[in-house]
Image (tube, grey):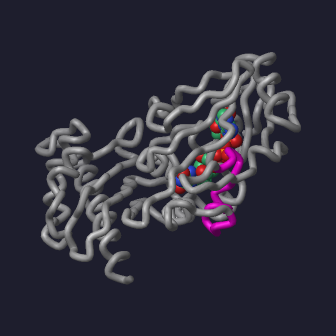
Amino acid sequence: MKPAAFDYHRPAGTAEAVRLLSDLGDDAKVIAGGQSLLPIMNMRLAEPAHLVDVTGIAELRQTTVDASGARYGATTTHMRFEYQLVPDVTGGLLSRMAAGIGYQAIRNRGTVGGSLAHSDPSAEWPTVMAALDAAVHVLSVRGMRRVPVRDLLLGFFSTALEPDELIVDVEVGRLPASTRWGVCKTARKPGEFAESLAVALMEHDATPRIRQPRLWLGAAADTPVRLAGTERLVEGHDVDAVTADDLVVPIAADLGADPGAGDPAARYVLHLHAVTVHRALRAVHEEVSDE
Ligand SMILES: Cc1cc2nc3c(=O)[nH]c(=O)nc-3n(C[C@H](O)[C@H](O)[C@H](O)COP(=O)(O)OP(=O)(O)OC[C@H]3O[C@@H](n4cnc5c(N)ncnc54)[C@H](O)[C@@H]3O)c2cc1C
């Protein structure tokens, strides 16, 4: 199918973009890479009368870096993170996450701001940016505001953005050298959205001990979930002493699910999450032991 007719606008700057969004109201949508919006429009699930294309705005492509971290322009593509064409202040975590998104053609056009604004709980950026406690800067005719990603993501395809607001950049704090990361994406085949997506952060330990873990799970609920109970369970244990099976019950508790559910499909999903989180935990220590 093809999308319904729309008027196309290509502002040269952010002030012009937010003025257009304000004037056009609910009839307008921002378009960046178009990798989520265009399929939806092709299926006629969205029929905006106006598209405001922000990819011509130089400011939205810029990255600024200082000692505390980086601000990545909203239209920075997944590909630029993947190939570290922008500085990675997380010691490779952003690059690794970007490389797992869809196919190369998707990564060439899709943007970090578009992914966060779309708020698909199976997508890479919402989970890793929540885990990193990143924040977006959001502009409208009323001014700029800073919104932590954890507050931005309200649910499945739902965010705290007003219809006339534009994500300008994503602020990511520099990961201390003492912090290590591991990730795991479980998908049916390469290029597909995650069935389960885990990000593990922890403090460096020369031993296989799990120290101060921060565990985040995507593709499990309407927004990324912090696995606080699971963190407490694994804290201080040797990674080799923890099995995926050990994680099923605490992950179920963190998700508010019943680990003893009679439904085999529900049990399978919990086990999948447990295996994915377990692999992310192990990945942290595999990285450390490679040094
Ligand atoms: C076949 C396929 C496979 C994919 N696989 C994956 C995958 O494995 N993992 C993954 O994470 N993603 C995947 N994606 C999605 C892809 O990453 C998209 O690029 C991304 O979700 C949206 O970014 P975009 O720049 O294309 O946004 P667009 O499609 O242009 O816009 C998406 C939404 O965000 C809004 N928006 C865009 N930019 C801004 C802004 N700066 N401020 C405010 N609102 C804005 C738009 O109005 C729209 O509502 C896949 C997509 C396809 C088509």
Location of the C terminus (image quadrant): bottom left
* Residue 3, picture quadrant: top right
Residue pictured at 53% horizontal, 40% vertical:
135
Please give the range of residues in magenta: 72-85
Task: Answer whether residue 39 is visible to the viewer in this image.
Answer: no
Seen from the viewer's position, the closer of residues 249 and 38 is 249
Image coordinates of residue 242 in percent, x first then y, are 15, 65
Image coordinates of residue 75 in percent, x first then y, are 71, 47
On the rendered structure, is 54 left or right of 179? right
Task: Answer whether residue 105 is visible to the viewer in this image.
Answer: yes
Seen from the viewer's position, the closer of residues 248 and 38 is 248
Residue pictured at 45% horizontal, 42% vertical:
121
Position of residue 52 relative to residue 115, above or below, is above
On the rendered structure, is 176 left or right of 278? right
Position of residue 91 relative to residue 25, above or below, is below
Position of residue 288 relative to residue 70, above or below, is below
Q: Which residue extends farthest front?
A: 67
* Residue 178, picture quadrant: bottom left
On the rendered structure, is 190 left or right of 267? right
Residue pictured at 78% horizontal, 44% vertical:
59
Q: Is residue 82 magenta?
A: yes
Image coordinates of residue 215 in percent, x first then y, are 31, 52
Q: Is residue 67 magenta?
A: no
Image coordinates of residue 57 in percent, x first then y, are 82, 43
